[in-house]
Image (spheres, helix red, strand yellow):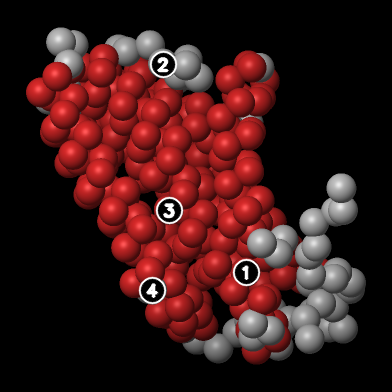
Amino acid sequence: MAAPSSPAVSEPPAAPSATSPPGALRRLYGVFLRHQLTWGRAAVIVALGGLAVLVGLAVRAGADDQVTAGTEFINNFAFTTVVPICALMFASSSLGDTVDDRTLVYLWLTPVPRWKIAAAATLASITVALPLVFLPLVLAAAATGAGPALVGATAVATIVGTIGYAGVFTALGLRFRRALVWGIAYILIWEGFVATASATAAKLSLRAYTASILSQYTGVGLRLGSLTVASGIVVPLVVGAAFTGLTSWLLTRVTVD
């Protein structure tokens, strides 16, 4: 099988200036934010969120044990599908689209430290993705009738999960063409199958950390949910920051035309 295509890499002709114009990070953030706000992407996530609320109501009406059924539903739908797919759609396009349409050169040639470009792209993705998943998923958790523990766990896991996935998929979008395909493959294959087969692999899956938050808050045993709440919160945040650093490094290596 042919290796995935990606932007060519080489040493850049010159390092960016250590200083940058005042407010550069804020302006870059605004540029990426406007680029992220598309009705098509938002419509897909809103539809998934609406479906989550409807299923949550069905759980309330039909489940004998609403806490267990509600927790399993939120884990298996919200954090297996909605949160990672939403983060993938927005984060992979933040820099990936600039590679595809050959506009990355305009960012690459600006006298701005690469970490500011990476941080602005990741923060813009989080800003757009998080509200689109936070409200419907919290409403879905409440709709199940499982109680405040599940609602609180869903809120916390949605925030940290979105941040972690956004960092990962921003780097993925810069490094690989057709990042949506590779991101879905990661979600389905690694998080869906490989992580469930090995305790070591599970620790390399963001899904394990969101599941652990749900499990520890509600007391419902979940597959991959054996980690502590502290690790469930801290690790995705560290992953998001680490991959933002990786994106910054990739920006110093990528050749644009």
Image-quadrant location for residue 20: bottom right
Residue 67 vertical position relative to residue 87 in the rendered view, above or below: above
**Type of amino acid under label 2:** Leu
**Dot 4 lies on which element?**
loop
Number of other residues with Cα within 10 Å of mark 3, as a class: few under 14, some 14 to 19, many 20 or more: many
Number of other residues with Cα within 10 Å of mark 1, as a class: few under 14, some 14 to 19, many 20 or more: many
**Dot 1 lies on which element?**
helix
Label 1 – label 3 distance at C-alpha = 15 Å
Label 3 – label 4 distance at C-alpha = 13 Å
**Type of amino acid under label 3:** Cys
Q: Position of residue 53 (x, y in %)?
A: 20, 40
Instruction: Read off the residue under disc 2.
Output: 222
Residue at the spot 87% in from the left edge and 53% down from the top edge: 2
Residue at the spot 64% in from the left edge and 58% down from the top edge: 179
**Type of amino acid under label 1:** Gly
Q: Position of residue 237 (x, y in %)?
A: 49, 43
* Res 38 label: 4
Sequence-first tag of 1 and 3: 3
**Dot 3 lies on which element?**
helix
**Type of amino acid under label 4:** Thr
Numbered disc total: 4
Q: Position of residue 176 (x, y in %)?
A: 72, 61
Sequence-first tag of 3 and 2: 3
Give the number of the mark in front: 2 or 4: 4
Sequence-first tag of 2 and 1: 1
Residue 119 visible in the picture = no
* Res 86 label: 3
Instruction: Read off the residue under disc 1.
Output: 96
Near-viewer residue (252 or 15): 252
Label 2 – label 4 distance at C-alpha = 35 Å
